[in-house]
Image (cartoon, rainbow, N blue to C red):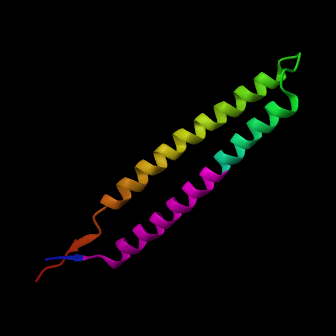
């Protein structure tokens, strides 16, 4: 018969909690990068050298990368919920 494997369940719970924490932290970082973009544009916008646009483009690239990472973490989180933590025990 199938029974819950406590070890597998425990590991899944640890992974679940770590993923949740990492997602929260990355969202915080993403918000901070967005704030940096706004601050940079407000502080040094229209720089004759064009450095402000290059900085803004780099920040946006970072935001794009963070978004891709978050998407992957959400997918992993979803797949983690599908993990089978049962084991077969005879008799």
Q: Position of residue 80 (x, y in %)?
A: 37, 58
- Compared across the picture, whether 11 is left or right of 52 comes to left
Q: Quadrant of the N terminus?
A: bottom left
Q: Position of residue 29 (x, y in %)?
A: 67, 49
Tell me: residue 77, above or below residue 17.
above
Quarter of image, res 42: top right
Tell me: residue 77, above or below residue 10.
above
Q: Position of residue 13 (x, y in %)?
A: 43, 70
Magenta range is 4-28
Q: Quadrant of the C terminus?
A: bottom left
- Compared across the picture, whether 53 is left or right of 86 comes to right
Quarter of image, res 24: bottom right
41 and 80: which is toward the camera: 41
71 and 15: which is toward the camera: 71
Q: What secondary structure prevails in the magenta region?
A: helix
Q: Residue furthest left?
A: 91
Q: Residue furthest bottom?
A: 91
Q: Indicate whether residue 8 is drawn in magenta.
A: yes
Q: Position of residue 41 (x, y in %)?
A: 80, 31
Residue at 42% across / 52% down in the picture? Answer: 76
Tell me: residue 27, above or below residue 44.
below
Residue at 83% across / 18% down in the picture? Answer: 50
Residue at 35% across / 71% down in the picture? Answer: 8
90 and 76: which is toward the camera: 76
Q: Residue furthest front?
A: 42
Tell me: residue 27, above or below residue 68.
below
Q: How many marks?
A: 0
């Amino acid at each position: 018969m199938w029974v819950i494997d406590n070890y597998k369940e425990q590991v899944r719970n640890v992974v679940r909690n770590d993923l949740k924490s990492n997602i929260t932290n990355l969202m915080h970082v993403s918000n901070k990068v967005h704030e940096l973009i706004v601050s940079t544009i407000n502080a040094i916008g229209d720089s004759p050298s064009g450095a402000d646009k290059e900085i803004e483009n780099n920040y946006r690239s970072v935001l794009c990368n963070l978004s891709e990472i978050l998407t992957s973490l959400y997918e992993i989180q979803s797949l983690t919920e599908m993990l089978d933590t049962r084991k077969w025990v005879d008799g």
